[in-house]
Amino acid sequence: KRRYLTGKTRFGLIFSVTEMEVKVIDRSVEAIHAKERAVRTALNAAGLVAEGYAKVHLEQTPRRVDTGRLRNSISHKAHDDRVEIGTNVEYAIYVEFGTRRMKPNNFLRSAVGDHLPEYREILKEYLKGK
């Protein structure tokens, strides 16, 4: 059979035209899933970097007691449209925001806010060409 038009695309339709036959193959769902996987992978990468910055911030800040529990509990979780970084240690909120007797140590807010351009670049790099 002789083909007049063939093509592959990530989005939309693929048309395969032969003398008497037209096939329409819809690959848009696969492309959407590929894009979603790429976004999740990019958010995971950014979350891992933010997690590292939070841990380094805690290590570089003088403290009275250091068991490593807070630092070791910092983790991230990527969702479809965002990444969360945090900890399940009950006293983390007092370290982050301080108390009447203790100055705040913004280890989470600094890890996120001070590095936003870097996270944007990570997302751009992972989503380039997707």
Image: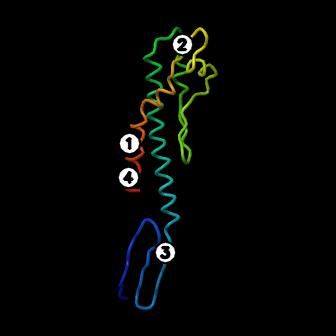
Q: Earlier in the sequence, mark 1 or mark 3?
A: 3
Look at the picture and state if 76 lies above or below 16.
above
| Residue lying at 41% horizontally and 51% vertically, measured from the top left | 127
Question: Closer to us: mark 3 or mark 4?
Answer: 4
| 91 with respect to 54 (left or right) | right
What amino acid is found at the position of numbered circle 1 in the picture? Glu
* Separation of residues labelled 3 and 4 (CA atoms): 25 Å
Whether tag 4 and tag 2 are in contact, CB under 8 A, the answer is no
What amino acid is found at the position of numbered circle 4 in the picture? Lys
Find disc 3 in the rendering and name its residue: 25
Q: Position of residue 38 (x, y in %)?
A: 46, 51
Question: Closer to us: mark 1 or mark 3?
Answer: 1
Q: Earlier in the sequence, mark 4 or mark 1?
A: 1
* Separation of residues labelled 4 and 2 (CA atoms): 42 Å
| Residue lying at 41% horizontally and 42% vertically, measured from the top left | 120
Helix, strand or loop at label 2? It is loop
What amino acid is found at the position of numbered circle 2 in the picture? Lys
Whether tag 2 and tag 3 are in contact, CB under 8 A, the answer is no
Find disc 2 in the rendering and name its residue: 103
| Residue lying at 46% horizontally and 35% vertically, measured from the top left | 48
Question: Closer to us: mark 2 or mark 3?
Answer: 2
Look at the picture and state if 58 lies above or below 1.
above
The quadrant in which the C terminus is found is bottom left
Find disc 1 in the rendering and name its residue: 121
Q: Earlier in the sequence, mark 2 or mark 3?
A: 3
What amino acid is found at the position of numbered circle 3 in the picture? Ile
Q: Position of residue 54 (x, y in %)?
A: 47, 26
Helix, strand or loop at label 3? It is strand
